[in-house]
Amino acid sequence: MEAEDILQDAFIKVFDNIGKFEFKGSFEGWIRRIVINTALKNYSKKSFKQEQIGIENQPELPMEPDIYKHLNEEALLTLIAKLPEGYRLVFNLYAIEGYSHKEIADMLSIQESTSRSQLVKARKMLQSMIIDLQKIAV
C-alpha cells in the first residue's frame, strides 16, 4: 500500500509539472527521476520519524544523585571529547554554543534532520557514559 501511495504521489507531481518538461532528455527518464525522488523523500521522512519515535519511547534510566558528586565540569568535558567527531561537533554547537539546527546545518553543509539526529545520538551516548561512570562509582 505504501508503494502505491508513493507511486500516486509521484504521478500527481508528474501531472502538476508536465509543463516544465523541456524535451532535453527522455520523457521516461524524467518520470523515473520524479518517482525515485518521491520515494527517497518519503523514505527519508519515514526514517527520521522512526528514529525520533524510537528514541523518545525508550524510558530514561534513573540516575542516582551520587554521580553528580563525581561529575564536575572537567569530567563532563572529557566525556564530550570522547564522542565521535560528528556527534561532538553538533553537540558543542547546539548545547554549548547555542546555535539552532538550521544554523548548524548551514555551517556544516548538512540537513537540519542530520543535525537533530546527531544531537539525539550524542545525548544518548553521553547518558550511557554517565551511567557507566555511575556503575564504577558505586
Image: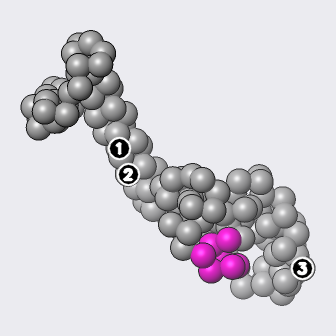
Q: Position of residue 85 (x, y in %)?
A: 77, 54
Label 3 sits on a secondary structure element that is helix
Q: Amino acid at mark 3?
A: Glu
Q: Find out whether the residues at labels 1 and 2 contact each other: C-beta distance under 8 Å.
A: yes
Where does the magenta region start and end? Answer: 93-99
Q: Position of residue 28 (x, y in %)?
A: 23, 13
Q: Position of residue 53 (x, y in %)?
A: 40, 55
- Distance from Cα at disc 1 to Cα at disc 2: 5 Å
Q: Residues within 10 Å of mark 1 (few under 14, many from 20)?
A: few
Q: Amino acid at mark 1?
A: Lys
> Disc number at residue 19?
none
- Is 42 located above or below residue 116 in the figure? above
Which residue is at 28% across, 34% downward?
38
- Distance from Cα at disc 3 to Cα at disc 1: 39 Å
- Residue labelled with disc 1: 46
Does any portion of residue 128 appear in the rendered image?
no
> Disc number at residue 49?
2
> Disc number at residue 74?
3
Label 2 sits on a secondary structure element that is helix
